[in-house]
Amino acid sequence: MPPPLLSIDRVSVARGDRALLNGVTLTLPEGRHTAILGRNGSGKSTVVQLITRQIYPTVGAGGDGRLGEVRILGRAHWDVFELRSLLGVVSPAVQSDFTSDERLEVFDAVVSGFFAARGVWNHVVTEAMRHASREALGRMGVAHLIGRRMATLSTGEARRVLIARALVHQPRALLLDEPCGGLDPATRRQFLEALRDVARSGVTLVLITHHIEEILPEIDHLVLLREGRVLADGAKDALLTRPVLSDLFGLPVTVDRRGDWFWAHLD
């Protein structure tokens, strides 16, 4: 049996006296699209940082002095550059990093995904890399942006370019941290439809969000985080209900379903 995409075993993370995660245990199989849902401050971004190796577990819950363990594709220890070739990550922090460079051109930003770098300085770019980069940009509907500077793109354009960058080396999974932040409703829907195509292509999606309406129809599993703990972990249809979401958000929530999409609003 293949190892799961992600396995977190009794992991806690603290910053000063504050527990960001408290004894979290979680398994995400490869091939199962999953959304991690919770309020701001629930621990979602901390999970992302654990996966990307920006932070590491601290002493485990219960005072037993045990460090929790995070395994990705069955391994606890990774070379970060190797991991980036298997797990694409798109987040507000990544976007800010790329769009803040006034010199960085769109095609260079995408092809630099092969080197886990920002730009192609001192790297040899092969024709195969160029072809894969053009193909990824076309797949995300932004090939026409080649020649533009990343700093000049709209939020939605930059987001699509960065997903193309994440896809150039055909990763096994794509981690999307609040991918629709800053998008207007029309751009958001177009962006989500593009993500549906990615989900159908065989790349495992892990979506981090606090917006119910961003959960793609292809995502059939949810993990609900509240105050640094897993509140629930199960099938989407079982968890996107009034009682469960009211408990998650701490206020009465009404859930509507429109075709394959769910919507929620406060009473």
Image (spheres, rainbow, N blue to C red):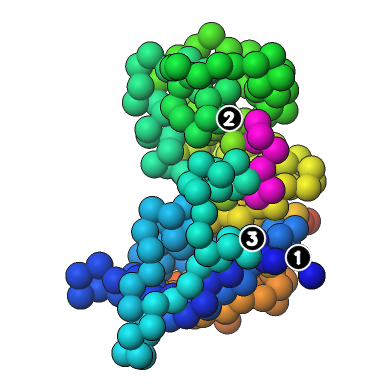
- In the visual, does 66 lie left or right of 214? left
| Residue toward you, 171 or 160 | 171
Question: Residue at the spot x=67%, y=76% of the render?
Answer: 234
**Amino acid under disc 3:** Leu
Q: Which residues are magenta?
A: 167-173
* In the rendered image, the vertical position of residue 203 relative to residue 246, given as above or below: above
Residue wearing tag 2: 114
Q: Residues within 10 Å of mark 1 (few under 14, many from 20)?
A: few
Is there CB contact under 8 Å for labels 2 and 3? no
Could you give the CA–CA distance between mark 2 and mark 3, rounded to whole angstroms? 20 Å
- Counting residues from the N terminus, which is met first, the one under dot 1 or under dot 3? 1
Residue 170 painted magenta: yes
Question: Residue at the spot x=53%, y=72% of the render?
Answer: 8
Question: Residue at the spot x=35%, y=16% of the render?
Answer: 102
Name the mark on residue 2.
1
| Residue toward you, 115 or 158 | 115
Prevailing secondary structure of the magenta residues = loop
Image quadrant occupied by the N terminus:
bottom right
